[in-house]
């Protein structure tokens, strides 16, 4: 009986933790803060034509608000995703160019018409139609208020993406989950993942000798991994091979990340042989 009472008491707390808290007039006394509109899995497509990408990554809810000052108006969109990786994935595939990066948190992008951030399970977008200086001056205060009202656990990148070499290319880092995500990226690997279930962190590194694409990929099943290796030219006679040069002159290499985790691998593609160990070494 005590367990039932405890769970009944805990339920509102759990629901609150899953609900995005809107901004109010108390946050910005000099502005008119609109009532929030909310969208769920069934209604998202009525608001966002690109809903498919959000749904594939693991969408939970969207809250939209408008904030109006005498000389500026902005729109706030807060997408709640299932995981921090999903929120970062949406962010990483949405960012094109930034005037400022990593201003409030490690993964945010500030430019004239939009501020974007991946903050825990939240993908935050703050936009202005005019991009006026008055509107832009409010992006960071509004984002900061959102983060204070919706505390999240910050995403920790997996090994080796915090190493110095990869930090230099951090602006090119993306998280991709499934073919829809891959099709929305600039990574030339669509043909390698046909019929393959996967998720991955991938990064592009510019090098004087070669363009290097590097990824940490997690496959759902051994069959998914085998199909990928076959399509990537890393299988001979049904047996995986560590590297290969294909007919297009591309060098490809793969390596298991941990001995006890056969479904997570590093994958590298470059125009000249470039070992994975040179990327992953501390």
Image: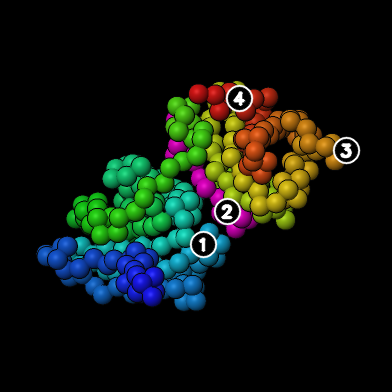
The image shows residue 60 at horizontal and vertical percentages of: 45, 67
Q: Which mark is residue 6?
A: none
Compare marks 1 and 3 and give the one earlier in the sequence: 1
Tell me the residue that label 2 is attached to: 177
Describe the element under mark 4 as helix, strand or loop: helix
> Judging from the image, what secondary structure is the residue with disc 1 in?
loop
Q: Nearer the viewer, residue 31 or 152?
A: 152
Is 253 on the left or on the right of 165, as rendered? Answer: right
Q: Quadrant of the N terminus?
A: bottom left
Q: How far apart, in angstroms, are the residues tagged by discs 4 and 3?
A: 26 Å
Mark 2 or mark 1, which is nearer the start of the sequence? 1
Tell me, for residue 277, which label it has, or none. Answer: 4
Q: Are marks 1 and 4 in contact (CB under 8 Å)?
A: no
Q: Is residue 15 visible?
A: no
**Which callout, 4 or 3, points at the residue further toward the start of the chain?**
3
Q: Could you say where residue 62 lies in the image, as x and y percent from the top left?
A: 40, 68
Q: Is the Cβ of the residue at disc 2 closer than 8 Å to that at disc 4?
A: no
Rendered view: 235 above or below 222: above
Magenta-tinted stretch: 168-184
Q: How far, Cα to Cα, is label 1 from label 2?
A: 9 Å
Name the element at disc 2: strand
Residue drawn at 34 percent across, 53 percent down: 152
Q: Residue at x 56, y 27 (%)?
A: 279
Q: Quadrant of residue 149?
A: bottom left
Give me the C-alpha separation between circle 1 and circle 3.
37 Å
Between disc 1 and disc 4, whose residue precedes?
A: 1
The residue indicated by pointer 1 is: 58
Residue drawn at (31%, 63%) of the image: 76
Residue 225 visible: yes
Q: According to the image, label 3 marks what residue?
A: 237
């Amino acid at each position: 009986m005590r367990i039932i009472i405890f769970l009944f008491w805990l339920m509102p707390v759990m629901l609150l933790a899953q609900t995005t808290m809107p901004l109010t007039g108390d946050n910005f006394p000099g502005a008119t803060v609109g009532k929030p509109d909310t969208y769920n899995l069934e209604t998202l497509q009525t608001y966002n034509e690109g809903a498919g990408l959000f749904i594939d990554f693991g969408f939970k809810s969207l809250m939209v608000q408008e904030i109006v000052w005498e000389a500026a108006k902005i729109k706030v969109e807060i997408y709640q995703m299932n995981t921090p990786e999903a929120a970062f994935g949406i962010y990483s595939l949405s960012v094109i160019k930034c005037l400022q990066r990593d201003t409030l948190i490690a993964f945010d992008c500030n430019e004239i018409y939009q501020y974007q951030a991946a903050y825990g399970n939240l993908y935050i977008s703050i936009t202005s139609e005019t991009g006026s200086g008055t509107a832009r001056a409010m992006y960071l205060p509004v984002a900061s208020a959102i983060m204070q009202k919706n505390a999240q656990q910050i995403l920790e990148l997996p090994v080796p993406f915090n190493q110095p070499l990869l930090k230099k290319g951090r602006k090119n880092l993306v998280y991709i989950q499934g073919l829809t995500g891959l099709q929305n990226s600039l990574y030339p690997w669509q043909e390698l993942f046909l019929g393959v279930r996967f998720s991955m962190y991938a990064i592009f590194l510019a090098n004087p000798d070669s363009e290097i694409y590097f990824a940490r990929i997690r496959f759902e099943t051994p069959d998914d991994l085998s199909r990928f290796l076959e399509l990537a030219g890393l299988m001979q006679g049904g047996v995986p091979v560590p590297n290969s040069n294909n007919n297009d002159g591309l060098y490809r290499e793969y390596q298991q990340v941990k001995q006890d985790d056969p479904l997570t691998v590093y994958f590298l593609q470059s125009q000249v042989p470039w070992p994975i160990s040179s990327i992953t070494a501390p």
